[in-house]
Image: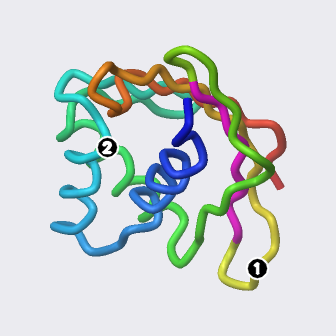
């Protein structure tokens, strides 16, 4: 998958977007209509469910930012990439790894998240 890095960056940009209409637009461009997200602490389905889940995470972690950790890797229709959540002071709060299934149209159909470390 040639666009693994770009897709991972777009995904993190959706998680970092604080403007509600802009975030919803990012979610719609990035995820299929029936997309699913699952990690140890939350889950969401469809554009509305995923957007609400991201909004909830932003409320729980105000002024925090996700950054890409390492180099995304992909083969066939599977993408994996690491990420770090940084607090307002820049310190690492959470580190994780996401594995995504990419639909034929290039959007994400399913994301499964893993938490590697939580401060």
Q: Residue at x 83, y 43 (%)?
A: 117
Q: State the residue lying farthest toward the top.
A: 76
Give the side of residue 49 with respect to residue 53, left or right: left
Q: Is residue 89 above or below residue 35?
A: below
Residue 40 is at least partly visible in this image: no
Distance of label 2 from label 1 (alpha carbons): 27 Å
Does residue 16 lie above or below 50 as drawn?
below
> As drawn, is 85 to the left or to the right of 48?
right
Q: Which residue is mark 2?
A: 30
Q: Residues within 10 Å of mark 2 (few under 14, many from 20)?
A: many
Q: Is residue 63 left or right of residue 33?
A: right
Specify the segment rendered in magenta.
Answer: 79-86
What's the residue at 34%, 57% (across, down)?
55
Task: From the image, tell me which residue sits under label 1.
Answer: 90
- Residue 83, given in percent of the width and then of the height, sits at 69, 50
Helix, strand or loop at mark 2? helix
| Sequence-first disc among 2 and 1 | 2
The one nearer the camera, 27 or 49, is 27
Q: In this view, which residue lies farthest toward the front?
A: 2
> Which quadrant of the view contains residue 30?
top left
- SS state under label 1: loop
């Amino acid at each position: 998958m040639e666009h693994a890095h770009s897709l991972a960056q777009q995904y993190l940009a959706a998680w970092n977007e604080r403007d509600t209409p802009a975030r919803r637009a990012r979610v719609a461009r990035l995820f299929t209509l029936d997309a699913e997200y699952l990690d140890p602490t939350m889950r969401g389905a469809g554009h509305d469910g995923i957007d609400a889940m991201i909004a909830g995470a932003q409320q729980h972690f105000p002024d925090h930012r996700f950054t890409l950790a390492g180099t995304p890797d992909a083969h066939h229709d599977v993408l994996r990439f690491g990420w770090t959540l940084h607090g307002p002071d820049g310190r690492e709060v959470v580190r994780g790894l996401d594995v995504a299934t990419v639909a034929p149209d290039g959007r994400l159909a399913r994301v499964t998240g893993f938490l590697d470390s939580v401060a």
